[in-house]
């Protein structure tokens, strides 16, 4: 019997199937996120003169939400970089929705 890097052929087949399922889920989430961004961009383009004066107010609301509910998430990409450099343990889960909504 041959030795495989990740166990038997059954294990490899299971890992391949799991990879396909995870890839399909990520593809769906990425598609939804892209469609929402395109929709928001269309709204922004159609109503630019109404939205530009509201940008400072929206910015203040985003900063308030990060300060009140964000915890360590207010560090943003700096937190992700510190985790990648092993200076911190983990990225807080609330960082993802904060980044998606504030985008």
Image (cartoon, helix red, strand yellow):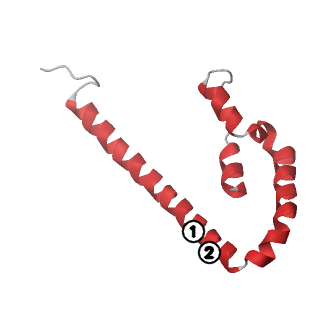
Residue at 64 percent of width and 34 percent of height: 80
In the drawing, does residue 4 fall left or right of residue 79?
left
The residue wearing badge 2 is: 42
Q: Residue at x 42, y 47 (%)?
A: 22
Which quarter of the rendering shows the C terminus? bottom right
Give me the C-alpha separation between circle 1 and circle 2: 6 Å
Q: Secondary structure at mark 1?
A: helix
Give the numbered dot on residue 19. none
Quarter holding residue 76: top right
Percent position (x, y) of residue 54? Answer: 84, 68
Q: Position of residue 12 (x, y in %)?
A: 26, 33
Residue 23 in percent (x, y) is at 40, 48
Report the side of 102 relative to 38 (left or right): right
Q: Is residue 91 visible?
A: no
Do callouts 1 and 2 mark residues in contact (Cβ within 8 Å)?
A: yes
Query: In the rendered image of this protein, does residue 90 appear above or below residue 64?
Result: above
Label 1 sits on residue:
38
Residue at (22%, 27%) from the top-left corner? 8
Quarter the N terminus occupies: top left
Q: Compared to 48, does 101 lie above or below?
A: above
Q: Looking at the image, is 51 positioned above or below residue 91?
A: below
Question: To which quarter of the image does residue 41 belong?
Answer: bottom right
From this viewpoint, is residue 54 visible?
yes
* 13 vs 40, nearest the viewer: 40
Classed neighbour count for the residue bearing mark 1: other residues with Cα under 10 Å, few (<14), some (14–19), many (≥20): few
Categorize mark 2 by other alpha carbons within 10 Å: few (<14), some (14-19), many (20+): few
């Amino acid at each position: 019997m041959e030795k495989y890097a990740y166990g038997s052929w059954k294990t490899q087949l299971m890992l391949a199937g799991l990879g396909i399922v995870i890839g399909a889920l990520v593809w769906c989430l990425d598609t939804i996120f892209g469609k929402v961004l395109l929709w928001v961009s269309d709204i922004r383009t159609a109503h630019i003169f109404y939205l530009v004066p509201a940008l400072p107010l929206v910015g203040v609301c985003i900063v308030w939400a990060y300060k009140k509910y964000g915890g360590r998430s207010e560090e943003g990409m700096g937190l992700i970089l510190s985790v990648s450099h092993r200076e911190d343990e983990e990225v807080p889960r609330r960082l993802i929705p904060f980044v998606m909504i504030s985008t």
